């Protein structure tokens, strides 16, 4: 809950620190955000939801925000207190490794690799099919420049999980 008297004038930005440091100066939410998957909601004083965003796998070097030309969320360079700066995305993603027969108690997994050496890759909304099982990666999910992401094929839900096992 924002402190009484908190105002945001037209065109201004309000930075809220998502941590539990509520006794420190500035606005602190009292909670942290998960780097792998989270939903964030904004409510007005009447508890009417006025905005929301749900995201998947995040990069430690970038933020997500609304693009300048649209209201769609996209990957950005961090710009606290200023207009968002969108980042171009690669789709040059491949399977890099598959582990389908782990020792007892282990999970199947696969690894995605961003082959692009200049741009991060957007993998949000990608589908991975295993036989007749299809899993969708959460929107606003990313792989760093030249980076890798391990996805567990453990029949669980999550930004880095598939609702399937890999046939041995």
Image: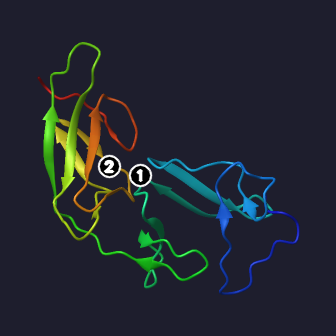
- Specify whether 95 is left or right of 74: left
Image quadrant holding the C terminus, namely top left
Kindly identify which residue carries mark 1: 56
Residue 85 locus on image (x, y percent): 44, 79
Mark 1 Cα-neighbour bin, 10 Å: few <14, some 14–19, many ≥20: many
Q: Is residue 112 above or below residue 7?
A: above
Q: Dividing the picture into quarters, in which one does residue 102 lie?
A: top left
The secondary structure type at the circle numbered 2 is: loop
List the single residue furthest toward the left: 168
Q: Residue at x 35, y 41 (%)?
A: 160
Residue 110 locus on image (x, y percent): 20, 38
Residue 137 numbered tag: 2
- Specify whether 95 is left or right of 118: left
How is colour applied across the structure in the image?
Answer: rainbow
Q: Dividing the picture into quarters, in which one does residue 130 lie?
A: top left
Q: Residue at x 65, y 87 (%)?
A: 11
């Amino acid at each position: 809950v924002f402190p009484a008297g908190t105002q945001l004038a037209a065109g201004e930005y309000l930075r809220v620190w998502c941590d539990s440091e509520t006794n420190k100066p500035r606005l602190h939410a009292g909670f942290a955000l998960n780097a792998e998957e989270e939903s964030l909601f904004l409510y007005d004083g009447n508890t009417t939801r006025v905005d929301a965003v749900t995201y998947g796998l995040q990069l430690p070097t970038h933020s997500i925000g609304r693009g300048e030309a649209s209201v769609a969320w996209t990957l950005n360079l961090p710009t606290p207190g200023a207009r968002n700066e969108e980042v171009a995305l690669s789709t040059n993603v491949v399977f890099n490794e598959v582990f389908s027969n782990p020792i007892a108690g282990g999970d199947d997994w696969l690894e995605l690799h961003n082959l692009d050496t200049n741009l991060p890759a957007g993998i949000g909304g990608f589908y991975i099919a295993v036989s007749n099982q299809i899993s969708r990666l959460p929107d606003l999910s990313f792989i760093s420049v030249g980076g890798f992401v391990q996805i567990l094929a453990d029949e669980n839900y999550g930004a880095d999980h598939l609702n399937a096992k890999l046939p041995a």
